[in-house]
Image (tube, rainbow, N blue to C red):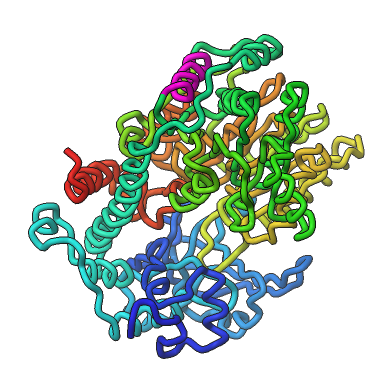
Amino acid sequence: MQLTDPVKTVKGVGEKSAQLLEKLNIVSVEDLIRHYPRNYDDFELPIKISEAAEGRIVTVEGAVSRVTSMPNRRKKVVTCYVSDPSGALKLVWFNQQYIVKLLKPGYRLIFRGTVKRDNAELAIYQPKNYLKNDYVKLLGSLQPIYDLTKGITSNFISKAVKQALSEISIDDPLPASFRKENDLPKLSDAIKTIHFPKNKQEALHARRRLVFEEFLDFMLALRKLKSKKEEAKNNYVITDFDACDDLIKGLPFKLTGAQVKTFTDIKRDMSSDRLMSRMVEGDVGSGKTVIAMLAVLSVVKAGYQAAVMVPTEVLAKQHYADFEEKLVRYGAKIELLVGSMTAAQKKKAYERIEKHEVDVVIGTHALIQDALNFDNLALAVIDEQHRFGVNQRKALKDKGLHPHILSMSATPIPRSLSLILYGDMDLSVINEMPAERLPIKNAVVDTGYRPTALNFIRKEVLNGHQAYIICPLVEESEDADGENVIDYTDNVRDFFATSAIKQGDGKLVNVEYLHGKMKPAEKNTIMERFAAGEIDVLISTTVIEVGVNVKNATVMMVENSERFGLAQLHQLRGRVGRGAAQSYCIFMKGCEGKDVDERLDILKNNNDGFKVAEEDLRLRGPGDLFGIRQSGELSWKLADIYADAPLLSLASEYANKLTNIS
């Protein structure tokens, strides 16, 4: 068996299973073995029920009692209690009617799951159940938990991976001496162990090798880009910036000192004999877009074309409207190009762009389609560049004859890491916020504060504002251990409806949900309705972290905030505070602990993303099995630039040796 063979080559994976696995981007045998566990179930001895604490994953053993089964809206709910001499605990299952046959009053069973607060009592939702003899066999073991799709279980993936690993050979590109010197296991051992570790130490050791590999591949790709940059001369020398000066004078606000310095860097690059390749790093709301707009205008006035690539359609449409409003008086012709356009619409747009009837093209991944050709592309702007892979960024560059590159990122990264990650680019940092921005007011609370928080959100909505609520999961599943979007939305709608009755005002709050598993068109519709003010409260996964700018949104509430990295929480917080009104961020913690409080207090007391990132780097280490990865960060499967900063440096040094860079 070869790594490139189709996944259905693996014994036990049929045609139907292969189609389901494709939804997880598992097409080949290598895709399968590289589909790493996102966590592990660690089986420990059962505890007393009285020791079960909110937010903890626990195992309890006791007698079953008070079994009930009843429909609840779109779900069927089974409830029972399990008790031991120390107390009782509520158990709840959704859409698992078969469980009733197992729950015979008086039977002693073992149950495992995450403890949550259910009004005045503690409960476990969707607990797993075991006979004592079966559970004893699992004691002390780590069972892999994978990202799944409907019809595929963690057990199925585990068996398929084990079968594949027994039939393939994996070559190791790293010399044995280097591996030994840097405590890196063989690649084949690391892949096997990451799926089937005997303990946490083994899992961490395997992860270390695989993280190094991810960083090294990325660094080698960067070195190729850097060598091409150093060879490239400036084919588009821009020296006239009079229109830019005029645009700056007409802005309703004054540029910050950091913005002025960054644009000065850009002007110097574009007027030199060398091609510009610059990264602009700035906090959420620091004003990067207006800097990109000035660079675009300078290119247009020189008679060239510019392209602006952003990660979502909603953001592309918002940029399109903003650019058109400010640049049309300078004669700029602007085109929007996104995936949801029809084939006929795209074809006409391609023709206009190729004939240079268009000066500026703003779009998503649609900009890098083979059918699109520019007439004279002089500038490529990549917004939220960490959302695009190296190959995607290269594809946009290849649309022109060595165009200037201006990348932008709102993910604050400590300078020491920036110099490594963006080693192929010059770096500008916008570290000042516009003077008119009101600082966001932050609060860190436990789940008992939820009714108060929801009432506060309702008050903001009645005052004409909007709010976001972030949940870590899409729906209840076998591995769910956090608030989920779909059921949570039902509960919030009920809460607001009840509040309207209690308050006697009859004012309803329009609540909708959004998550990454929805179809693109469905997601865009929801985000556009929220941007238009048709939705009051948007309950979402982190899919909204980047991609929508709603100045009317004044409240961000994050459930289970302890599950996210500080830098990601700061990114989420950046969705509010964009207008003139005072904005608020509520970090709801699903569990208690000194470490949780220390981390979240950093956000409570600090709105500066760069300081948050420095603290994140200081606090996070290999203590968590997989850390709390930044969602989508540079498209790595395991690596985390904060927790794994030393490995990033090691990979950078080794890449330099391989490419003979001193």
Q: Image check: 632 left or right of 3?
A: right
Residue at the location (48% across, 16% down)? 264
Residue 351 coordinates in the image, percent (x, y) = 73, 50
- Which of the image's four quarters has the N terminus? bottom left
x and y, in percent, of residue 464 in the image: 82, 29
Identify which residue, 328 or 588, lies in the foreground: 328
Q: Residue at x 63, y 61 (%)?
A: 517
Q: Which residues are magenta?
A: 258-272
In the figure, 102 relative to 31: above or below? Answer: below
x%, y% of residue 333? Answer: 74, 33
Count up the numbered dots. Answer: 0
Give the residue at x 62% y 13%.
242
Residue 269 colored in magenta in the image: yes
Tell me where residue 240 sits by quadrant: top right
Q: Residue at x 72, y 72 (%)?
A: 76
Q: Would you place residue 519 above or below residue 447 in this image?
A: below
Report the front residue among 168 and 631.
Answer: 168
Residue 494: say if magenta: no
| Viewer can see residue 625 | yes
Query: Toward which corner of the image does residue 555 lie, by quadrant?
Result: top right
Camera sees residue 441: no
Residue toward you, 221 or 613? 221
